Image (spheres, grey):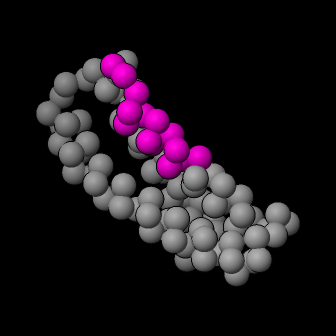
Amino acid sequence: MTTKKILLAIIISGLYFMLLFLNYHFFKLDFVLIGFFQELLTIPMLLLQFVLLFYAVKFAIRDKFSFKKSSVYLLLFLLIVIFLIGFFSISKT
């Protein structure tokens, strides 16, 4: 995996969880097809976060946590996305 692929996966999973949060709290769309895809994709997206975290840490260690390389920024961006997922899951309705 390259850093560009990891960044793309982080952005896609972050957007997915943002849309999931918005649908749950604001849009409240109750279509069968949307519910199907939510149930189908939520657990794989959560597992993808841990895989991406592993690769981001691996690249950051490889680059010796240098801020001149993009791997540290990938790690920081992923940690922010994971924090927001946790925040979204415990936010009150």
Give the quadrant of residue 88. top left
For residue 17, above or below residue 90: below
Q: Is residue 72 visible?
A: yes
In the rendered structure, does residue 73 fall within the stretch colored magenta? no
Instruction: Pinpoint residue 74: horizontal percent, then vertical percent.
Output: 65, 60
- Residue drawn at point x = 51 percent, y = 40 percent: 84
Q: How many marks?
A: 0
Q: Quadrant of the N terminus?
A: bottom right
For residue 57, above or below residue 26: below
Q: Residue furthest left?
A: 32
Q: Quadrant of the C terminus?
A: top left
Front residue of this view, candidates 1 and 74: 74
Q: Is residue 18 visible?
A: no
- Residue drawn at point x = 59 percent, y = 68 percent: 56
- Residue drawn at point x = 82 percent, y = 63 percent: 67
Q: Which residues are magenta?
A: 80-93
Give the quadrant of residue 70. bottom right
Q: Is residue 86 left or right of residue 79?
A: left
Q: Residue furthest bottom?
A: 62
Give the quadrant of residue 47. bottom left
Q: Is residue 49 left or right of residue 20?
A: right
Instruction: Pinpoint residue 58: horizontal percent, then vertical percent.
Output: 60, 77
Q: Is residue 92 left or right of residue 69?
A: left
Front residue of this view, candidates 64 and 2: 64
For residue 25, above or below residue 11: above
Q: Is residue 34 left or right of residue 46?
A: left
In the rendered structure, does residue 91 fall within the stretch colored magenta? yes
Q: Main secondary structure of the magenta part?
A: helix
